[in-house]
Image: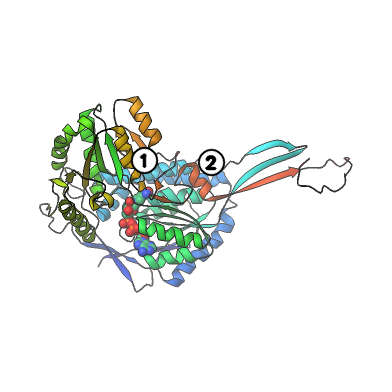
Amino acid sequence: MSKKVPLYIDGEFVASKSEQWIPVTNPATQEVIAEAPCATQSEMEAAVASAREAFKTWKEVPVSERARVMMRYQALLKEHHDEIAEILAQETGKTFEDAKGDVWRGIEVVEHAANIPSLLMGETVENVARSIDSYSYTQPLGICAGITPFNFPAMIPLWMFPVAIAAGNTFILKPSEQDPLTPTRLVELFEQAGAPKGVLQVLHGGKDQVDFILDHPEIRALSFVGSVPVAEYIYRRGTENGKRVQAFAGAKNHCVIMPDANKQQVINNLVGSSVGAAGQRCMAISVAVFVGAAKEWIPEVAEAIAKVRPGAWNDENAAYGPVISPQAKERIEKVITEGEQEGAKLLVDGRNYTVEGLPNGNWVGPTVFSGVTPDMNLYKTEIFGPVLSISEVETLDDALEMVNNNPYGNGTSIFTASGAAARKYQHEVEVGQVGINIPIPVPLPFFSFTGWKRSFFGDLHAYGKQAVRFYTETKTVTARWFESDIEATGPNMSIHLK
Ligand code: NAD
């Protein structure tokens, strides 16, 4: 019998009383490795009640003590790093190396959250008026929530709850139903780090559980990461209900290749950033734009990508794993078929791919198209598979026009030896995260994850200073102390501070 994933409510891992369970499968075999419950109404209410109660005391815990929980947590995550990566690899299909990267990028956020005392500091000005001082505090909001996608089951939950909780909030996490085992392990370690009962709750499920979070009046802020249609829905319904919402969504990331770039670097970086992780990264390069004479390198890029072999998570020679589900495989293969029909040139075809010994895996082989134009569905859709589309343009201005006309704005990169070209691209491109000779420019946690346009709905971004602002309210105090021997003046009838 497969393992039943517990909920985490009021400091206890509890077996759900739900009658609805979602199978969690190993994408390389289809074996059901666990079942996740769709939390019931009373379980969800219990989570909110516990979060409400815990907030009353947690917000009064000194900030340095809250920081120490994060310090212990990051130490525990490091100690259990490989073990978490193994759980993660089995439920996502990621290779062990890639799974370790997922865990590591999450640990970095916890390290940052351990700096919470300085991140929460307000501002002060003395003598804003005669004998009057002003200073501000950042205070927690209350109960916050997070809804996460399948593709980074360690990193993305860790973008959210450590920062929110270190800031003094309590938090309800609803992880992806496709890989709930990794978040469960993260939560066990959080408890072990000394997080008090009730500061974190975990509810599993799908749309109904998300709707509960969206509609609950006590949940003040909601962080979401996932696909565009769901992000739009979450942002609309959450903000209509008066919540603070940040919703990170899909992408179409372009890499612009200038003819003066280092050819071998271009080839190596395009291979890893396009088909790595089976293309299931929101910052994956899905479009390579070759400028001018750089187009001569296209056959060599295709040849290098054709050599990449997917395989099981524990196969050391595998470059990437299966895609998450049979539905994802079917969707990706359909886009490839349509791409051919639309007139793009299929240089490497990853359809009907098999891996020896694993006939039931959701395999999609590396795929490369050239001659891709912006009117094609292949170009417009977020494929979220190991598929690279190649376009050719004459000038850097043409490349900029193409990238800026794309509705998404998560990430982009330029490969060049010219500082002037890189500076122009960095300045003029309408995308929130730019790499210069770096294909996947995911900022470290002391910056923020700053997607633009249809890749992000909201104002304040994930992690870094922006996340601390997202999870807090600013209170500004204007104070005057009367010396007892000062004679009281008459009433001040204006708002002018004198
Ligand atoms: P998804 O939108 O299908 O699911 C994300 C979460 O929303 C899950 O927890 C799921 O249970 C919930 N959900 C799904 N359908 C829902 C509905 N109709 N109503 C309410 N909730 C619903 O996304 P996914 O397939 O798990 O993840 C892949 C997507 O996430 C890609 O589009 C990828 O680009 C995006 N992503 C974006 C970022 C970013 O930072 N911009 C990072 C990672 C992933």
Q: How far across and down, in percent of the image, does residue 247 sit?
A: 42, 53
Residue placed at 39% from the left, 57% from the top? 231
Asked if ligand 1 lies within 8 A of label 2, the reply is: no
In the picture of the structure, the residue carrying the numbered disc 1 is 442
Residue most toward the bottom?
Answer: 19
Is 433 placed left or right of 386 in the picture? Answer: right
Residue most toward the left?
Answer: 356
Q: How far across and down, in percent of the image, does residue 110 sit?
A: 43, 44
Label annotation for residue 351: none
Q: SS at mark 2?
A: helix
Label annotation for residue 119: 2
Q: How far across and down, in percent of the image, does residue 407 sit?
A: 35, 48
Category of crowding for the residue at label 1, using alpha-carbon neighbours closer than 10 angstroms: few (below 14), some (14–19), many (at least 20): many
Q: What amino acid type is highlighted by mark number 1? A: Val
Residue placed at 28% from the left, 51% from the top? 380
Is 243 placed left or right of 489 in the picture? Answer: left
Placement of 414 over or under 332, stated as above or below: above
